[in-house]
Amino acid sequence: MAIDNQTKQEIIGKHIRTAAGRQRLAASMIQPLRRRRDYTSVGRKAFYVEGLPDGALPIYDKDPNITAYVVGEEGENIVAVAKPKRVLFPLFEIASNPEIQLTEIKQRRFDLIERSVDLAKSEIQAEEDRKVFAVMDALAADPTNPNPAIPVTGNLTANALADAFANIERTDIRVAIVFLNAKDYADLRKWDRDTLDIETQAILLKTGLMATLWGAKLMVSRIVPEGTVYCCGEAEFFGRIPVRTELTVLSADDPKNRLIGFSIFEQLGIGAYNPFALQVLEITRV
C-alpha cells in the first residue's frame, strides 16, 4: 500500500526517537554504496594491553640500559625515555565528534546515525594504529638499535623474512606478528603453500589476519607504509598499551540546532621498549 510523504515522515519521526525504533528503520533501509571496508585496528595485537584500575598510574620499572619510546602528552609526538629507572606512559585521548542534521536523517535511505558512529569508530582506530607504527619507527631508528633495518631489493623473499625472524629469535624471543601493506603481502601470496599457511575464515580475514608464517601471524593494514615490514616479538617483551577508557560513545545532541551528535573517544598510552623484539625490513622495488 502506497503512503504519502507526510505519513512517511510521521512514521520516521516516531521511530527515530528511540534506539529500538532506529534499529527497526535500519532493517528496512538500503545500505549506502561504499568504496571499502571500514578500518579495523591491528596495532594492539603486537602490544601487551592492560586496563588501568581507577587511580592507577601507567608507571613501569625498566632496565637503566633500555630506552623506551612512548607517545607524548596530547598524543602529538614520540618521546624517548632513557635514564630514569621508571617510565611513565602518558595517557592521551583520541576522539571524534560526529554531528548529523535531523533533516539529513530523514532524507537518507540508510541508517545515517549508525553509519556516522561506525565511521567515527573507524577513524579513531586508524589514528590509534598510526601512533602505534610511529612508535615502532622511533624504536627502529634508535642509533643503538641492535637490529638495523634489513634492505630488500625487488620482491619480498622468504630468505629476507627468515633473516628478520632470526635477528629476533637469537635473543630467545619468538616472532609473534608481522605487519605488511597489501602490496608487499602480494609477494608472499606467490610463495609455496607449504611455507605459507593462508587463512580462509572470513571472520578472521576481516580483522586483518591473512596467514601464518613459521608460527607468526601476518597482518595486513593500509596504515602500514608500502615498502615497510614490521616483525614484532611476543607482546610482553615488546611494548605496552595501558588503557584508562576503552572506546566509548556518549550522546552529545544539540536540540537548538536540530543536531544529533555523539562524543566518541578512548584514553590510552602507547609505548615500546625492546629493540631486540623488533625487526624492520625496507623494500625497494625496481
Image (cartoon, rainbow, N blue to C red):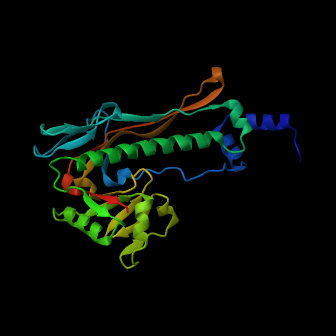
Give percent across and percent down for residue 168.
21, 62
Q: Position of residue 263 (x, y in %)?
A: 51, 32
Residue 27 appears left or right of 272: right
Residue occupying the point 17% across, 44% down: 67
Residue at 16% over, 62% down: 171
Which residue is farthest left?
64
**Residue nearest the viewer, comparing 76 with 117:** 76
**Image quadrant of residue 245?**
top left
Q: Is residue 145 left or right of residue 131?
A: left
Q: Which of the two residues, 227 or 12, is positioned nearer the viewer here? A: 227
Residue 214 visible in image: no
Can residue 144 be seen in this snapshot?
yes
Residue 259 on image: x %, y % = 63, 27
In the picture shown, does residue 18 fall above or below 183? Answer: above
> Is residue 11 shown above or below 154?
above
Task: Tell me where residue 7 appears, x and y as whole percent.
Answer: 84, 36
Farthest-out residue, front = 286
- Where residue 191 sits, quadrant-wise, is bottom left
Q: Residue lying at the far top in this picture: please name it.
A: 256
Choose between 278 and 256: the one closer to the eye: 278
Quarter in which the C terminus is drawn: bottom left
Q: Residue at x 87, y 42 (%)?
A: 3
